[in-house]
Each structure stands twice: as structure tokens, then as C-alpha cells.
Amino acid sequence: MIKLYLDDIREPDDFDIAWQFYEGVAGVCNVGKWGFVAKDGHMVSECKYQEIWHFSEGLARVRLRGLWGYINLSGETVINCKYTQAFDFKNGVAKVSNGKYFGLINACGDELTDFVYSEIDNFQNSYAIAKRGSFYGVIMSNGDVHIDFVHNRILSFDYVNGRIM
């Protein structure tokens, strides 16, 4: 029994592991399954997931049957568990993988790009360097291509002005 952060709201034997609170909820584990508990002690999501991540922009990544999706702060599934990899939402956009390629989704689960990228770097000022096929280009967080995929590599990019340096 590991009890880390929930001393004031739950009995000591409620969970095997408890995480720190993010956005008012904490991840908890019971018998190898994960869920979320609110600061007032009520279960936001039952302990049923193989793996979870903290909430970011009101959504948390959850893994069920080997695939990732997202739930909201009410514990409702917002984006079904269908991705082999998923990342936190930042500015309303998350990078996800279908097992072969990466694409972008919004917080409603709408796909902003096709799944054609073998790499997508982190976004800065709405720009990210990405690789499609053998070439690199730059995409925007809305899914638009900003710089065509014609470069063997992009070593330096001006994220403020949106151009290769």
C-alpha cells in the first residue's frame, strides 16, 4: 500500500498508489487498474484503465485494451481508445498515432491531418517540424502545411517568424 497525496479525503486502504492532483483530480491505482479521484473524494473514473496520464487542458490520456483515448474531468470518454500512442493536449491539439504514422486531433477527436507523418516535433508558436516520407517540412497546429516537405532535414527553424533559418 502506497499512500502519497490523498490523506485527507480517503481511507488509507482505498488505493495501492495515488498521484498528485492536477486540475483537481489525482490518478489512483487499485489492484493494477487505474482511475481518477476528485479532491472531494468522489471517484471521477473507476479504476479500469491499464495506464493513465494526468489531465491537461481538461482531458487525460487513458489506455484500455492496449489503445489510448481521452476522458474529461467528469470521467466521460471524449475520444475513444483507438490510438497506439497519444500525447497531451496543448493549445487544443494532440499528436496521436495509428500504429504506423502520426497525425493531429483536436479536443473533440476530429482529425486535423491525415496520418502521414513519421515524426512530428513539439509545437512552438503553432509550428512543428514534421517528417513525411523521406522529407521534412513544417506543419501548423491547425493541420495546415506551412513549409512543403521537400527538405532533407530542417536543422534550425525560426518559430517566431515561421521560417527556416
Image (cartoon, rainbow, N blue to C red):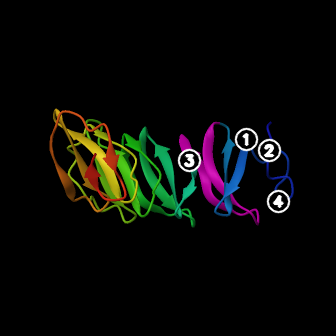
2 or 4: mark nearer the eye:
2
Residue carrying label 3 = 53
Residue sitting at 44 percent across and 47 percent down?
87
Secondary structure of residue under mark 4: loop
x and y, in percent, of residue 70 in the image: 46, 55
Secondary structure of residue under mark 1: strand
Give the position of the C terminus as an image quadrant: top left
Residues 103 and 121: in front is: 121
130 to 36, vertically: above or below: above
Secondary structure of residue under mark 3: strand
Graded by Cα atoms within 10 Å as few (under 14), some (14 to 19) or many (20 or more), the crowding at tag 4 reads few
Residues 161 and 114: in front is: 161
Q: Which disc is residue 17 wearing? A: 1
**Earlier sequence position, callout 4 versus callout 3:** 4
51 to 73, vertically: above or below: above
Residue carrying label 4 = 9
Magenta stretch in the rendered image: 32-52
Residue kind at label 3, given as amino acid type: Trp
Residue kind at label 2, given as amino acid type: Leu
Graded by Cα atoms within 10 Å as few (under 14), some (14 to 19) or many (20 or more), the crowding at tag 2 reads few
**Earlier sequence position, callout 2 versus callout 3:** 2
